[in-house]
Image (cartoon, grey):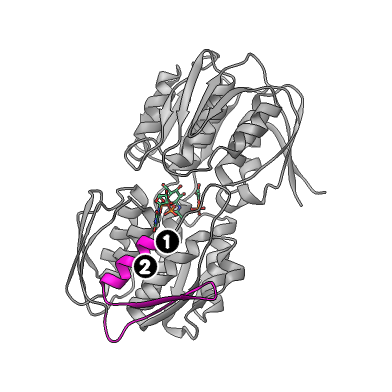
Amino acid sequence: MDKLLISGGAQLAGEVRISGAKNSALPILAATLLADKPVSIGNLPHLQDITTMIALMGRMGVELMVDEKMSIEVNANSIQSYTAPYELVRTMRASILVLGPLLAHYGHAEVSLPGGCAIGSRPVDLHLRGLEAMGADIVVDGGYIKARTNGRLKGAHIFLDVVTVTGTENLMMAAALAEGKTIIENAAREPEVTDLAECLNAMGADISGQGTSTLVINGVESLGGCHFNVLPDRVETGTFLAAAAATRGKVRVKGTSESILEAVLIKLEEAGAHISCGPDWIELDMKGNRPKAVSIKTAPYPAFPTDMQAQILAMNTVAEGTGSVIETIFENRFMHVHELMRMGAQIQLEGNTAIVTGVEELHAAPIMATDLRASASLVIAGLVAQGDTIVDRIYHIDRGYECIEEKFHALGAKIRRVAD
Ligand SMILES: CC(=O)N[C@H]1[C@@H](OP(=O)(O)OP(=O)(O)OC[C@H]2O[C@@H](n3ccc(=O)[nH]c3=O)[C@H](O)[C@@H]2O)O[C@H](CO)[C@@H](O)[C@@H]1O
Ligand SMILES: C=C(OP(=O)(O)O)C(=O)O
């Protein structure tokens, strides 16, 4: 199993290119199952979750051709199986995103229940309830969601009790081919949901309201092909900026946009960062200063994203002062706290709140990655710690970060991948 070996202490400096967003690329790949013609997707990130989605769709008989620039052409017409098996779903929850498209286009689907994971129980009840409201027959049997529809799904008025990103995406995709109008209220407003809506519209769907909490989808009879470029990854962007702030460095992230991570940039400025932005870049300069601790509370977009909680918490561990970190989305998203404390971080954990008092220095220790963003926070901690930190179980980080050690290395970090 690969590990990352990080010799801390370098101030990050330089430029880094941001990849396409994992959480946009995954639903867009699933959306190609709705089309009758080939769909081509550009700016696809090169990471494990994308490989898993390609493997899953390939297993169904879908033809996928990736070129050397990580564009992919997907032709779903060759599909032969409508099943997402447990062995693939268990490695990537986002596999649930094939449920809505398979059901809407082909009338049936069998998708393994994703189950819980390190960050929380993560049920999919709202996905299922929404599809049932559109006329689907759903049973859960032997760990599988078995869904069928007699004829086309029917448009429905759906109110989501909780703001759910993949739930909104699954229902929006299903509604795109349903008969009549669907209204989804309390919909997720994340940029990745908007990106998916734009891609579906480019395929011929009739969706409006994206970026607001009410989506209106007029179902169409069929969807065609298109070429679509995935938006930049706001979590990868924020991760490099948080690392730059923690190391008192100066980093420019390119191929990204300030408009998709305002809540994060505001907090980094509060931490003392000087931020400047261009049309497709953001620069953060700490002018050599120690960051100031900030308080954050995670909530659905446009508020502070849960996927950036661990990285800002890691910055706080070496900041001046005390900051509180409140996690409101997932009930168990503080696994990194215990590992950071092993490095000398001062953190008090009370329910969904972590009170972090910055220390002058963290100390290297062998530490274990437990989930994707927790892993990123441990890398940030390793970058600022005295000595050599070994981060184990980095398969979590490979799920969602493209060439992470190469990108940090290019910014002056002493980091390399080591095999057991
Ligand atoms: C592939 C992808 O895009 N993953 C993102 C997506 O995950 P994902 O879409 O799985 O997360 P959700 O937005 O659905 O989860 C939000 C909350 O709703 C609850 N819930 C969700 C669905 C449901 O049927 N019932 C229910 O109770 C969840 O347990 C959680 O407490 O949004 C999360 C929240 O921004 C991010 O952390 C993930 O990176
Ligand atoms: C939690 C995440 O991903 P997923 O929903 O795929 O587990 C994430 O991207 O931080």
**In front: 341, or 38?**
341
Q: Residues within 10 Å of mark 1 (few under 14, many from 20)?
A: some
Spatial distance from mark 2 to mark 1, Cα to Cα?
7 Å
User: Which residue matches tag 1?
Assistant: 124
As shown in the figure, which amino acid type bears the numbered disc 2?
Leu
Q: Secondary structure at mark 1?
A: loop
User: Is 213 situated above or below 140?
Assistant: above
Is residue 350 shown to the viewer in this render? Answer: yes
Query: Percent x, y for residue 367?
Result: 72, 36
From the top left corner, tell me how far across and down residue 237 is, in percent.
47, 38
- Does mark 2 have its CB less than 8 Å from ligand 1? yes
Point 31% across, 39% down: residue? 302
Q: Residue at x 43, y 42 (%)?
A: 234
Can you give x and y, in whole percent of width and height, for residue 206 in the image?
20, 66
Is residue 285 at least partly visible in the picture?
Answer: no
Q: Are marks 2 and 1 in contact (CB under 8 Å)?
A: yes
Q: Is residue 144 part of the magenta span, yes or no?
A: yes
The residue tagged 2 is: 128
The image quadrant of residue 271 is top left
The location of residue 323, given as percent across then percent down, is: 48, 20
Q: Which residues are magenta?
A: 125-152
Answer yes or no: disc 1 within 8 Å of ligand 1: yes
In the rendered view, does 349 fall on the left or right side of 273? right
Q: Nearer the viewer, residue 241 or 277?
A: 241
Residue 294 is drawn in which quadrant? top left
Residue 344 appears left or right of 420: left
**Side of 335 relative to 391 (left or right):** left
Q: Amino acid at mark 1?
A: Val
Neighbour tally class for label 2: few under 14, some 14-19, many 20 plus, Cα within 10 Å = many
From the viewer's perspective, is residue 336 above or below residue 250? below
